[in-house]
Amino acid sequence: MTRHRRQLWTGYVSVFLIFVSLNSVSAVTHYSVPEEMEEGSVVANLATDLRLDVKTLNERKMRVDVVANNKYLNINKDTGELFVLERIDREFLCPSKTTTSCFLKLDATIENPIRMFNIEVEITDINDNAPHFRRGTMHLDISESSPVGERFSLNNAADPDVGSNSVKNYHLSSSDHFALEIQTGRDGTKFADLILKKALDREQQAVHNLILTAVDGGVPTRTGTASIIVRVLDVNDNAPSFDEDKYVVDVMENSPIGSLVIKLNATDLDEGSNSDVVYSYSLYTSEKTQNMFKLNPENGEIRVKEMINYEDLKSYDMEVIASDKGPNSLSGQCKLTIQVTDMNDNHPEISIKSFQTPIKENVPTDTVIAVVSVSDTDSGDNGVVDLHIPDNMPFKLRESADNYYELVVSEPLDREKVPEYDITFTVTDRGSPPLSDNETMTLELLDVNDNVPQFPQSFYTIRVMENNAPGALLSSLTAFDPDLHENQYLVYFILEKEIANTSMSMLFSINPENGNLYALKTFDYEIEKEFLFHIEARDSGSPPLSSNVTVHIIIVDQNDNAPVIVSPWRVHGSVVEEKIPRSTDKGSLVAKVIALDTDSVHNSRITYQFLQVTDATLFSLDQYNGEIRTMRMFSYRDPRHQRLVVVAKDNGEPALSATVTIKLSTVETAVKAYSDMTEVPLEYDIFSDLNLYLVIGLGSVSFLLLITILVTIVLKCQKPKPSKVAPPCRNSVISERNSTIADSTLVSNDAYWYSLFLAETRKGKLVVRQPVPKGSRYIVSSIPRGTGQTDTSDSAASTLQYPK
């Protein structure tokens, strides 16, 4: 080798030299050379780099020994140059591809004095190997019914070079039916999958010949090829398919050999041998993975074959093919990732240092209830623990120190909603899978008087029938208090209220223990119609709480008053005698029966009807206003005396009634028209201020009684005089008492008036105060109507006695 070529090779060498000391063993001297250098190529000048005298190298017996390898390098003792003794093949020297670095370690020794130099020569890779396939020809049997997009695993190419000089890509020869998809493994290895991009038709083309080319990344690039022969199979058109395309399974390290990892299941819709499935690993699955896990070809079970070590490899990737046993076998594949889980074999521990129970329900928030400590003897994530309590509880955990927690009240407590809590402390480590422990404590709440008594209703309406028995139970007004013990015991009171100088406690009584309300007297609807008062419920807590409710007592009317006929008036008995001209026209008013009932509206509704009538064709009676009218004119055949019995009936249950008998006598001559009655509806004037009239009436009762006696004496002494104003008319009615009932005012000397009754006649209005207490007397006086006939001097006041 010429000196010129040595210098040329030397130009490719990158020398990294570091001298640390000049002791007997010097620091390591680094050099870097490419593989495949020609024999005799100079690597470096050791004499110059090590600062040795070239002339003394022979005398000092300098030599170079390659550690644990063949003698690839040697030293020229004349020049001190380190040169290539024989061809260096990096792939032979460093067959492992786990690292891209490859080193030759040399020891350079010199004597007199002895010194040793450590020399490290890095052999760099050159692209001197082309990719090659383990199988030069790959046979693929593909059914013509394979769907577009189905993938088929191909044998990957291997390249002993490393780094950028290894396999970087694959190319497929031109094809209308197939495409190529490149995948990268975890170690950077490139794999190629054949993808069906167009449906196959065996009748058009039974065999597809493809060329797969593997290309490395060196400069210049090198390639390797393999032939792919695709045979299109006929008819067996259902390939086995897995439940999922990809599975991820966790397996614990140190799992027993033979333990089941997963049972794969592939199904084939065909029948017979075409549906029998056989499982196998694809070429994508590495040999190491196949040695670690055993696949049962009959049932798809994958079991542990060798001891699994998490520190060696944390996961395994494999591809399993399911093939049927049809004449033209079809296959499906799935990918499986087995993740090795580090063993977490120590459970965390929990310790309750203190726990306060029971506590009052009104305890303030942030009050500490318990102190808890946690621990785990594992290391790493397996030793990191978390403490939890159930959600939706009014408590929270607060870390007070390392692995110490305080349980504090986070929300207001309410014993009435939740009387006690079962609090479960759960401690969980962060291992995979996590381990946990728990402990449950029961927290009891003590009652506080924080709830007022509650009535089911805020307003009670109680209907009581009049004439009730004293002491009768009206209703039970029971309140509820959700507190406990003395806070729950209730006492009931009637809040005092006076009505007409009468206290409520004199009318009603309530049981203080159960809230039963009783009536202490008999009520009369005609006197008392309703009561309104309050009832209070008070608990026995400290301080006591109370609430009240409004009670409305409504007295319900009974039909206990019969109608009273006030017109036509009878002085004695129930017979009234009247006279009527025989020339009375059809439709003329003969008499008007007026009855009063002191009951309520419903029970006081009066209807009139004939009980007896001498001639039913002669008279008619209006059932609502009591007017008796002629239905025709009198004839000479009609008797002179007519007897009419009228009954006035109320609307109660049962109905009460009163009767009046009217004897009519027909006369040939006309009489005064003072007593004629006109059909005018009844009018009522309601006096609501009863107390005022009661005071006035009671004060003047004596005075009114005296006036009544004087007026009666005057009427008895007075004689009637013939009228000079009004001529006799055909429809006049003559009273047997020679006094008119019409044109008069009826006044009660009792002064306890409820309403005003008006009965209008041709000459005036009849005014009646009701209800009419038994034994009362009335004064009748004239009230002119202003119709032009104002001569009422013949009218006299008469006293009406209410029957006892």
Image: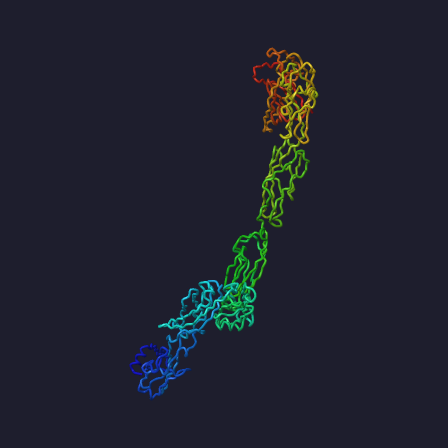
Q: Could you tell me residue 448's position as x and y percent?
A: 58, 51
Residue sticking out furthest to the left: 4
Residue sticking out furthest to the bottom: 59
Residue sticking out furthest to the front: 203
Asked if one can make out residue 526 in the rendered structure from this viewpoint, the answer is no
Judge by depth and name the residue closer to the eye, 259 or 707.
Answer: 259
Q: How many marks?
A: 0
The quarter in which the N terminus is drawn is bottom left
Asked if one can make out residue 133 in the rendered structure from this viewpoint, the answer is yes
Q: Could you tell me residue 772's position as x and y percent?
A: 65, 26
Q: In the rendered view, tell whether residue 202 sits above or below residue 80.
A: above
Q: How is the image coloured?
A: rainbow
Q: In the rendered view, tell whether residue 727 sits above or below residue 56.
A: above
The quarter in which the C terminus is drawn is top right
Q: Could you tell me residue 316's position as x and y percent?
A: 49, 69
Q: Could you tell me residue 501's position as x and y percent?
A: 61, 33
Tell me: 138 left or right of 621.
left
Judge by depth and name the residue closer to the eye, 733 or 262.
Answer: 262
Judge by depth and name the residue closer to the eye, 238 or 607.
Answer: 238
Tell me: 132 left or right of 252.
left
Q: In the rendered view, tell whether residue 372 sits above or below residue 776.
A: below
Q: Residue 764 lies in what quarter of the image?
A: top right
Q: In the rendered view, tell whether residue 470 sits above or below residue 706.
A: below
